[in-house]
């Protein structure tokens, strides 16, 4: 658990199991109608996912997942992703110096 209270708690789940459970400073997800960026303090929302790459920044690492069909919910700095398909993209821990790209 991070000592920084300004992080998101993230769960990425598919019927096959838990793809990721942890913290992130920023998330970019493929909504059905375009990319969606989420930071600490985001308003509560529920979004229909499209198919594409979900990226999250955790400290100095960028984690990438392919997600398809499902929902993303944000409530009280907790992000839940429920998708029919979840898979890690190769090279998942990429050092970052700026925003999640």
Image (tube, rainbow, N blue to C red):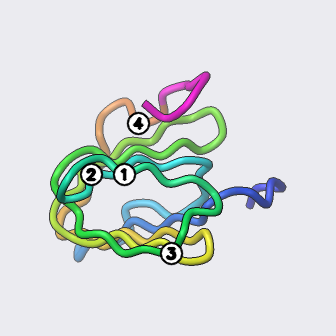
What distance separates the C-alpha of mark 3 from that of mark 2?
17 Å
Q: Please name the residue that numbered disc 2 is placed on.
A: 30
Of tags 4 and 2, the one toward the viewer is 2
What distance separates the C-alpha of mark 4 from that of mark 3?
28 Å
Mark 3 or mark 2: name the one nearer the start of the chain.
Answer: 2
What distance separates the C-alpha of mark 3 from that of mark 1?
13 Å
Q: Using a 10 Å C-alpha cutoff, classify the residue at mark 4 as few (fewer than 14 neighbours), some (14 to 19) or many (20 or more).
A: some
**In percent of the image, x 47 and y 46: which residue is there?**
56
Q: Please name the residue that numbered disc 4 is placed on.
A: 92
Mark 4 or mark 2: name the one nearer the start of the chain.
Answer: 2
Asked whether the beta carbons under mark 3 and mark 1 sit within 8 Å of each other, the answer is: no
What distance separates the C-alpha of mark 1 from that of mark 2?
6 Å
Q: Main secondary structure of the magenta part?
A: loop
Q: Name the quadrant of the N terminus.
A: bottom right
Residue at the farthest right position: 3
Q: Please name the residue that numbered disc 1 is placed on.
A: 36
What distance separates the C-alpha of mark 1 from that of mark 4?
20 Å
């Amino acid at each position: 658990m991070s000592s920084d209270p300004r992080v998101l708690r993230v769960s990425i789940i598919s019927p096959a199991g838990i793809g990721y459970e942890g913290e992130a400073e920023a998330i970019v997800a493929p909504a059905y109608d375009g990319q969606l960026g989420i930071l600490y303090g985001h308003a509560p929302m529920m979004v229909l996912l499209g198919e594409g790459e979900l990226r999250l920044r955790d400290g100095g690492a960028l984690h990438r997942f392919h997600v398809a069909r499902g929902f993303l919910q944000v409530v009280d700095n907790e992000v839940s992703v429920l998708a029919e398909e979840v898979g890690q993209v190769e090279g998942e821990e990429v050092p970052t110096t700026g925003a999640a790209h």
